[in-house]
Image (cartoon, helix red, strand yellow):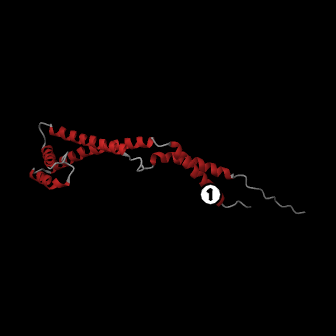
């Protein structure tokens, strides 16, 4: 008499396990997406725009403060003196900090040429300009990051988690439908 092996169902894989993994993974991704997705146009409302204006004004004040610190040095180096002349040339042209507008670039370049700066003075001048601008830019970026984070914190976490879980559910379901069958 011949015996045949009875085909048994593969019990090592449960279809609900894949769906559960999809739901959990989708929920986690939804939570992460809450803080990683960029702001929507609706989130960039008048309050947001007003805050960006205030942050920009404060960074300009930081730049002006750095300029005034150099301006108040009694015995300025040639590079520092040239820097202040360049800033003043910009102010004469109606530029708030003197470093923001291309229209006075030629006049500023002429001031630098007339100063007869040596190689070390030029390096110092470039360093001064970079430092003053970096302070303002750094302050602006930190302010924008902080306020953007605060806006993202207002987002409803549950909506992102539920949305991600729903997508995970459908992903797990689609995986179970499309996976090859385990026939022996």
The residue lying furthest to the front in this view is: 46
Residue designated by label 1: 174
Give how far across and how far down residue 131 sits, in percent: 24, 44
Q: Where residue 91 appears, x then y in whole percent?
A: 15, 46
**Residue sitting at 33 percent across and 43 percent down?**
50
Residue 110 in the image, given as x and y percentages of width and height: 11, 54
> With 9 as the anchor, is 76 left or right in this view?
left
* 52, above or below 13, in the image: above
The reply to whether residue 154 is visible in this rendering is yes
Q: Report the residue at 88% width, 63% height from top.
A: 2
How many circles with numbers are drawn on the protein? 1
Q: Pick the residue in front: 115 or 52.
A: 52
Q: Residue furthest bottom?
A: 2
- Residue 141 vertical placement versus 176 (above, below): above
For label 1, the SS is helix
Horizontal and vertical percent position of residue 49: 34, 45
Left or right of residue 174, residue 93 in this image? left
| Residue at point 30%, 41% (across, down) | 54
Q: Toward which corner of the image does residue 77 lie, by quadrant?
A: top left
The C terminus sits in image quarter: bottom right
Note whether residue 139 is visible. no
Which residue is depicted at the point 27% across and 43% down?
A: 136
Q: Residues within 10 Å of mark 1 (few under 14, many from 20)?
A: few
Q: Nearer the viewer, residue 160 or 27?
A: 160
Left or right: 6, with 72 as reference point: right
Quadrant of the snapshot with the N terminus: bottom right
């Amino acid at each position: 008499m011949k015996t045949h092996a009875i085909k048994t169902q593969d019990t090592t894989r449960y279809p609900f396990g894949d769906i559960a993994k999809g739901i959990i993974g989708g929920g986690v991704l939804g939570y992460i997406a809450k803080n990683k997705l960029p702001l929507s146009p609706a989130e960039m409302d008048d309050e947001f725009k007003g805050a960006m204006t205030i942050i920009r004004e404060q960074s300009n004040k930081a730049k002006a403060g750095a300029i005034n610190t150099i301006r108040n040095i009694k015995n300025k180096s040639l590079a520092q003196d040239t820097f202040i002349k360049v800033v003043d040339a910009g102010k004469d042209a109606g530029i708030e900090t003197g470093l923001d507008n291309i229209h006075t670039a030629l006049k500023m370049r002429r001031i630098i040429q007339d100063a007869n700066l040596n190689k070390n003075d030029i390096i110092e001048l470039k360093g001064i300009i970079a430092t003053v601008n970096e302070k303002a830019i750094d302050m602006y970026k930190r302010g924008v990051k902080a306020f953007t984070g605060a806006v993202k914190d207002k987002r409803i976490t549950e909506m992102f988690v539920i949305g991600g879980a729903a997508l995970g559910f459908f992903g797990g379901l689609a995986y179970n439908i499309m996976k090859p069958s385990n026939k022996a």
